[in-house]
Image (cartoon, coloured by chain):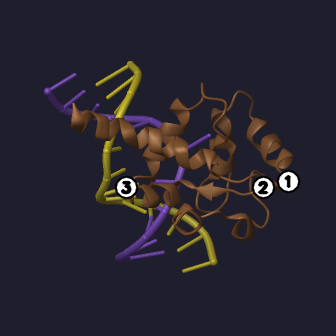
Chain colours: A brown, B purple, C yellow
Amino acid sequence: MSENSQKKNFFQDVYEVVKLIPKGRVTSYGAIASYLGSKGSARMVGWALIASHPMTQIPAHRVVNRIGMLTGSQHFDAPNAMQERLEQDGVKVENNQIVDFEKLFWDPAKELM
DNA sequence: TCCTTGACGCCAA
DNA sequence: CTTGGCGCCAAGG
């Protein structure tokens, strides 16, 4: 039972971190995976976000890949839903790519320490 | 039960 | 600098 809880905790932990992302800031799958200690399993972060779809309180639109591209926009209800939500947060998006991604980047490993 | 796919990321050529 | 390949872990067919 304890071992099973550990694995399930990974998904839950992803949601916790994503919910902590400040408005107007964004982060990457790898940064979250690294922060959780599962460095290299960035794919699982994306998988967890797919399962987070029913949970609207999770700002999954603030999570992009390492280059700031909205690769996950196709998984939203609408193809442009992710970009519109980011713009509502004050984040500029151009051609499915976040403008000034480096400046808007929010690293949980540094911010949450 | 085995094989393929996938919201990624790093390394080698 | 650009392209291709491998590794990570989980879920679906």
Mark 3 is on which residue type? Answer: Ser
Residue that numbered label 2 is attached to: A24
Secondary structure category for the residue under label 2: loop
Residue that numbered label 1 is attached to: A90
Q: Which of marks 1 and 3 is nearer the N terminus?
A: 3
Q: Distance between the residues labelled 2 and 1?
A: 5 Å
Query: Circles 2 and 1: CB distance less than 8 Å?
Result: yes
Q: Distance between the residues labelled 2 and 3?
A: 26 Å
User: Do pointers 1 and 3 mark residues of a single chain?
Assistant: yes
Question: Mark 3 — on which chain does it sit?
Answer: A
Which residue does the image show at 67% across and 59% down from the upper left? A68
Residue that numbered label 3 is attached to: A38
Residue B13 point in image, percent of width and height: 37, 77
Question: Mark 2 — on which chain does it sit?
Answer: A
Q: How crowded is mark 1: few (under 14 residues within 10 Å), some or many (20 or more)?
A: few
Which residue does the image show at 49% across and 45% down from the upper left? A14
